[in-house]
Amino acid sequence: MPDQVENQLIAELSRRVVTDVAPAEKRAFNAISKAYFKNPEKTLKGEGGDDELMGFGLAEISLLLTPIILEVVKEVLKDLLKDSVKDSIKKSSLTVLEKIQTFFKGLFGANPSQPAQLQYVQLLLPFSEENPLSQEKLRQVHQRARESAIRLGVDANQATLIADSVITSLQLPL
Amino acid sequence: MKIKTEESCQPRLDPFAFPSETTLRFALLLVSVIGASLFIYSILYWRYLETQGRLEPILNLARACLGQNGSSSSVLKLDELTTARAVFAQCSEPLEKEFRNAAWLALGGVGILLCLASLLYSLFPSLMIWREGLVFLDKDAAMEDVVVYLKHLCQEVGIRAPIFLQKPTSRAIGGRAFGSLGRYYVVLPTGLLTLFDQNQDTFRAVMLHELAHLRNKDVDKTYFSVAVSCAFVIAALIPFAFSLLSNSSAEGFQASWRVIALVLLIYLTLAAVVRSREFYADVRASTYSDSQALSPLLETVLKPKFSGWQITVISALERLPCFKRNHWQFAFLLHPDASERRHILRTTDRLFKLDSWAAFGTGIAATVAYESVTSLTTSLLRNVSGHTDAWLESLGAGFVFAPLVIGIIGLGIWRGTFVTLVRNQQDTEAGKLGIGLGLGLIFGQVLSFDNITSSQRALGLEKYDWAMQFASTAFNLLWSVLLLVSLYYFFMWMASGASVWLRVAIASHSPRPFYIAGLIVAGLWLTLWFGVIFLIRNADVLLLAPNSIEILFSLVLLFPLVISYITLQPLTLIALVSLWAFPLSAWLWRVHQTNSTSLSTWGFLDQLPDQTHLSTQKQIQLHPALMTGLKGGLIYCVLLLALRLGLRLLLPESVRNTDWFKLVLLYAVPIGFSVLMRAGIAMKIARQVKDFKGIHGLFAAFIAGCVMAWSVVVLNLLFGGTINTELVWMTFSLSVNWGALLSLLGMMVMRLPKYQMNGAVQDCS
C-alpha cells in the first residue's frame, strides 16, 4: 500500500508537469505511468522504431518526456521526504511516530473515518499545506530536478522548464 | 488523394485488380519452406539409416545384384534396354523402398511443421501483447476521443474496427497491424499518439496505412509467413544442425551448404512478403480522402531498418566485386526503400511486374524437393493404379510442379501484360521470367536431395569413368538448353494470350474469369511439358553404363522417333491446337467491336477521363490467316492431284502397286511436303500480320494442315485406295502435328511469336 500511494503521489505530480511541459503526451500519461511503475528502467530507456520490423517503418520521435518527468519527480520527492523526515525527527520524533501509528491504525481499520491513503500522503508531505517549503528548499529542488532531467537526456532549456513545472506542482494543493 | 504519374496525366493502375504480389510471394514462401523441409527430413532419414547401420547392407546388396546382372545395352535395341531397365529396377528396389519411406517421413515432417506454424500463428497475438506490454486503448478514459476517431476511420476504410492497443514505452510514430484468425489488432506507439493533437494529418495518414493492411487482408499472410519461418527453424533447421554434430563428413558439408542456400531463399522470400505488403498498404491508403500527408511522411521520417546481422551480411556482400549496393540492400530489408515507396505512390506500375529473381526462386523451390515429390507421386500412383511407367511418373511430378509455377509466374505474367497493354509498352519480361524459372529449375536440381543421394549415386554408378561424366554433362547441357528455350517461348506465348484476352477483359467488369481460364489452360500445357521434360531428364539413368557416349548419341538420334511417337498422341493434337485456339477465341468476344474499347474502371485507382480508350485498331486478323491457310491447303491439293495423275500416267501399274511406292511416294512424300508447306504458310502469315504473329501463323498452318490431310485421304480414295479410322487418324495427326511442330520451330527461329503491344491509353486531355 505505501508503494502504491507513493506512486499515486508521483503520478499526480508528474501529470501536472506533463500537462504543462509536454501536453501532447497527456493522453498517453496513464499507460506510460503504469508501465513506468512496473518497470522504470525499461520505460525510461524507451523503444524506438527499430523493434517495429513488421510495422510502418517510420522513424521515432526523439524523446518521450513522460517517463523522464516521472523519474525526475520520483527523485525530487525522495530527497524531499528524506529531508522532511529528518526535520520531523529533529523537531519531535513523537510526531512522526504518532503519524506512523495513525497511518497503521487507518490501514487496519482502527480509524475508518480517515482514509489510509490520505494519512500516508500527509505523512509524506508535511510541507504541502501548513508547512510550505522554504525558498532555499525550493531552489535546491529546482536544481535537483534540472540536473536529473539533463542527466536523463533532456536539453538544458527543456530541463529548466521541467524543473520550473515541478516547483509549481509541488506548491499546488493536492 | 489523386496522385498522377510525373511523366504524364495517365491515371494510376489498380494493383488490387489482380492477386497481389504479396500473395504470390507468400505462395512462393510456402513452397520454399515445404521444399526445404522435405529436403532436410529426407537427409535426416538417410542419416538415421546410416547411424543404425541399415544403409550399407542395402547398398551392398544392390551393388552385388547389379554386378551379377548388369550389362551394357544399346538404346537402339529395345529388348536389351527393357531388360537393363528391369534389372536396374529389380536391383535398386530395396533402395527405392527406402526413398519412398524417406519421402513419406518427410511428408509427415512437413505436416508437423505446418501444424506448428499454425499453432505459432494463432499464439502470436497473445505473445506479442504480453511480451511488449501492450495495453488496450479503449480502457483508458483519456483515449476516448482517439478511439472514436479511429472507429470513424475504420468505417471510412470499410472494415470492422480492430482492437486498438497502445505501446506505452515506444517512441515510434509508425503503427503496426497484426492478429490472426479474424481477430485483428492495431498498435499505436506513444510516439504516434502524440501526433493525434499535434499533427492530425500525419496521424491519419499513418492510421490509414495500418488499416489498409486489414483492408488488403495481408495480415494473415504476413504473420503466417513469420510463423512458418519460425516453425521451419524449430522443426527442421535445429534438428538438422544437431545431426551435423554427429557427422562432419563431406556428405555433411554437401548437405550443409545446400541448406544454407535454402535458408537464404526462405529469408529473402519472407523479406519480400513483408516489403511488398507495405507498398500495397501505401497505395490503398492513398485512395482515401485527406491522405496527402502520406507522401511527405515517407519523404521525411521513413528510415531504413537494419538489424545487427543484416548490417554484417550487407557489409560482407559489399566486399564482393559484383555487389550492387542498392539491389542487395533492398533484398535483405524487411522494409521497402523510402524512395521506392514514394515512387509507387505516384505510379503503381512496378507492382504489376514480377522480377526474374522471383522466377528463379520459384524454380529452386519447386525442384529442390523433386526426388521426394516424385517418390511420393510414384508411390501414390502405384497404390491407385497398381503399376506405373516412366511417363506416368514424370507426368505425376509435372502435375505437382506446374500448378505451383503457373500460380506464381503465370499470374505475374498476366499482371505484367496488363501494364504493357495499357501503357503501350513493349513486353520483354515474360521471356526473362521463363529464363529465370528455367535457371532456378536447373539450380534447384543442383541443390536437391536427389543430387546428393539418388539411387544411382548411392550405388556409386556415376563415378564410373570420365566418358560417363562427359556423357552426363553433355546430356545435362542439352536438357538445360531445351528447358530454357521452351520456357522462354512458353511464357512469351502466355503473355500473348494474356494480351489478347485482357483486351476483352478490360471492357468487362472484372479480369478474374479471364485470368483464371488462362491460367488453367497454361497449367495444363505446362503439366504436359514438365512431364516430357522430366521424362527426358530421367533418361540420364541410361547413361550410367560403360558405353555412355554411344548411348548419348543414340539418344540424340532417337529424338525424332520419340517426337513421331508423341505426334501420334491425341493429347498432342489438343495441346497444339490450344496454342492458337486459346488466344484467338478472344476474337469471338470482339466481333462486334469497332476500333476502340472503353476502359473499365476496375483497372484504375484514379477516376478516368471521359475519353479514355484502349486502341484496338491493330487486332486479331483471323481473316487473312484463314484465307492463307485455305489457299495453301487448296494449292497443295491441286499439286497432290497433279502428282498422283502424273505418277499414274508415267509409271506402270506393277511399280505403283509395290509397297515401297505406296509408302514413300503416295504417303511419306505428300505428308512430308505438306509439313514443309505448312511451315512456309505459317512464316508467311507471321510476316503478313502486325500482331500476335506466331499465333496467327500457327492458326493458318493448322487450317492448311486440315485441308492437306483431307486432300491426302480423299485423293487416296479417288485413286482406288482404302480408308479406315486408323489411317485417317495417322494421316491427320502426322500431317497436322508435325506441321504444327515445324511451324512452331519456324516461329522460334524467326524470334516469333514476337507480339507488339498495340493498345494504348490515349491522351487523357
Image (cartoon, coloured by chain):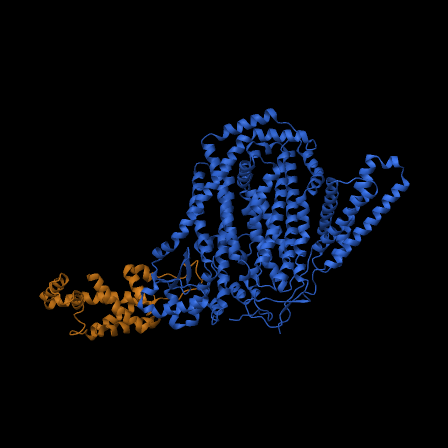
Chain colours: A orange, B blue
- Relative to A140, say whether B396 is above or below: above
- In this view of the protein, can residue B419 be seen by the observer? yes
- Name above or below for residue B654 compared with residue B238: above
Q: Residue at x 82, y 49 (%)?
A: B637
Image point 50% across, 64% down: which residue?
Answer: B338
Q: Is residue B711 left or right of residue B355?
A: right
Q: Nearer the viewer, residue B52 or A60?
A: B52
Q: Position of residue B517 (x, y in %)?
A: 60, 54
Q: Position of residue B244 (x, y in %)?
A: 45, 39
Residue closest to the far top: B68
Name above or below for residue A91 compared with residue B659: below
Q: In this rendered view, identify the residue nearer to me: B239 or B161.
A: B161
**Quadrant of the image containing the C terminus of chain B:** bottom right
Q: Nearer the viewer, residue B695 or B198?
A: B695
Query: Percent from the top left, x then y, of residue B96?
Result: 54, 33
Which is more toward the observer, B636 or B197?
Answer: B636
User: In the rendered picture of this protein, how many numbered marks are placed on residues?
Assistant: 0
Q: Residue at x 83, y 43 (%)?
A: B718
Q: Quadrant of residue B219?
A: bottom left
